[in-house]
Amino acid sequence: RLKIDSQGLFVLVICREVALALQAKGDAVTQGGSPNRALVALAAGIARHAFPHILLASGAEEMSGLKEAASWWALALFRNVARSGGDVLALTQSLVESLRHAEIQRASHTLITVAAAIHDLGAFGQIEAQVQTKVLAELRGNAAAGHSWYFDAALQALQTASLSRNLGFYLAGSSSILRWLHCLEEVGDPGHFEGTASMAKRSVPISGPPLMIYLRMLPSCQRAGNSHVTLRIDVCNATTLTFRNVSVGLSICRSSLLGKKDRTSWSLATGQVRPCEQSIESIHCRSSASLWSEMTVHGVQPLCISLSVSYDNISPPGLDTGAADQPSSANALQEIWSDEEDSSRLNFVCHPTPLSLSVFFRPFHGFDCPCSGMFPPPMVFRACPHTRQGPLSNLGLSGFDLQAWQPVGLHKLQHAGCSLALPGVQSCFAGLLALDSVSILCLLIRGPVGGSAEVLEVRTSNEVLLEEMYGNMKFWVLASLN
């Protein structure tokens, strides 16, 4: 029996790669190629040895999602073997026998998925009558409020002889299995999370001349419960003057509805790495300087970064203004330099910059594999049962083109070649909360076909995240437009 550790993950990856290889080979056969009998035989052997043993193996409770994800790909392998000319009778017998295990019958999502896989092989009638009854009862009990029609269609399909699409992928999808499917994709693409997909690549200008200030945020998940953010601040002198004793201050806060400041959700790296206020001795003509700072975010809240800039209010010695031959103009230059004659320093505050979704979320790909053939994937509604929605006008987003919205930190689900499961859904985004690597956020943008977006629906896997996101939706949208 397989242990649910690195060996279990290895079996999961093997099942995935062989299933995808069979699928690719099946496409080649459809285009006139010949089936690879050796590959089919190998895949059948792997499928029978992986399932249900991987699911029944002893392991820690937190590994249950890994077991489900491994089972998911093993069932995909069964299906692809059958479609590639494998022995359907032998495959079906193995799956039907697995339903006799009490562990599988106690796991609602797994029971439904296995029964659906047997249905896809055209053998649902071979399941014992009492098990069939239990499957249908579990299916009714899993219907999400407002979307029970998904499962009504599935109930009808289970009692028919065949179905054109993959019913197994159409039904399954708990939060734990989706999280492991997302982790599995990172195994296939190790640089995915560390790459640029979840980070804001470009710097954002937040102040105009004479000193141009640019801010760049580089988020990374440091440990559970925290998101570590490195801040790069570029100060550029756009003039022919020289600015001396330039000081750049950093402050972060969130304003509550009552106007109070909430400082429980973030902390600066003061005294640990770099201070909150840093100084530059001088910035000469057309030159620049870079400063670095750090912060740690402890919860999902709308936060803003505010930078303050100050420098000496004097005409720098040796100022090259083109008036070197006119000593009498020195007093005039002093007046031109500043109207605040009584102040020794000039102080400015830059426009606050909101922390974008990429600080809190990373793109979530768990809904992508294996493809359900439906858009949006039904697993969205099972994994994210908590939902709120409202017209864009009520959210303060009238006039925003959300069809072209590309929020950094969220993954846009592709729907090319998929059947439209929910009329009016124009796009769907998914993100995994980096603070716990468990909570899932889905944003559904609705509107008429060919028309503009009208409604924004927020779905989450936990209710606390839903309230924080929906109550500040205008902030999150505006923050992601940078």
Image (cartoon, helix red, strand yellow):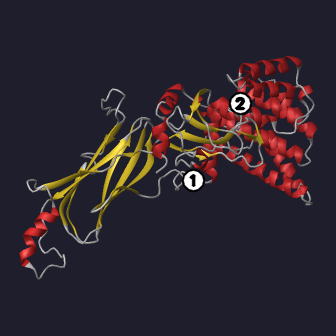
* Numbered circles on residues, count: 2
Q: Nearer the viewer, residue 384 or 243?
A: 243
Distance in Å between CA atoms under marks 1 and 2: 31 Å
Q: Position of residue 360 (x, y in %)?
A: 47, 41
From the viewer's perspective, tell me whether residue 185 is left or right of residue 477: right
**Residue 468 vertical placement versus 208 (above, below):** above
Q: Quadrant of residue 62?
A: top right
Residue at the (34%, 34%) spot, across then down: 255
Q: Which of 185 and 212 is in front in this view?
A: 212
Q: What kind of element bears circle 1?
A: loop
Amino acid carrying mark 2 in the image: Leu
From the viewer's perspective, tell me whether residue 291 is left or right of residue 470: left
Q: Where is residue 321 in the image (x, y as percent from the top left)?
A: 18, 75
Residue at the (66%, 38%) spot, across then down: 447
User: Which residue matches tag 1?
Assistant: 192
From the viewer's perspective, tell me whether residue 360 is left or right of residue 112: left
State which tag comes first along the sequence, 1 or 2. Answer: 2
User: Which residue matches tag 2?
Assistant: 56
Q: Which of 326 and 76 is in front in this view?
A: 326
Res. 353 in view: yes
Q: Position of residue 297 (x, y in %)?
A: 39, 40
Q: Which residue lies furthest to the bottom in this view?
A: 325
Q: In which quarter of the image is residue 120?
A: top right
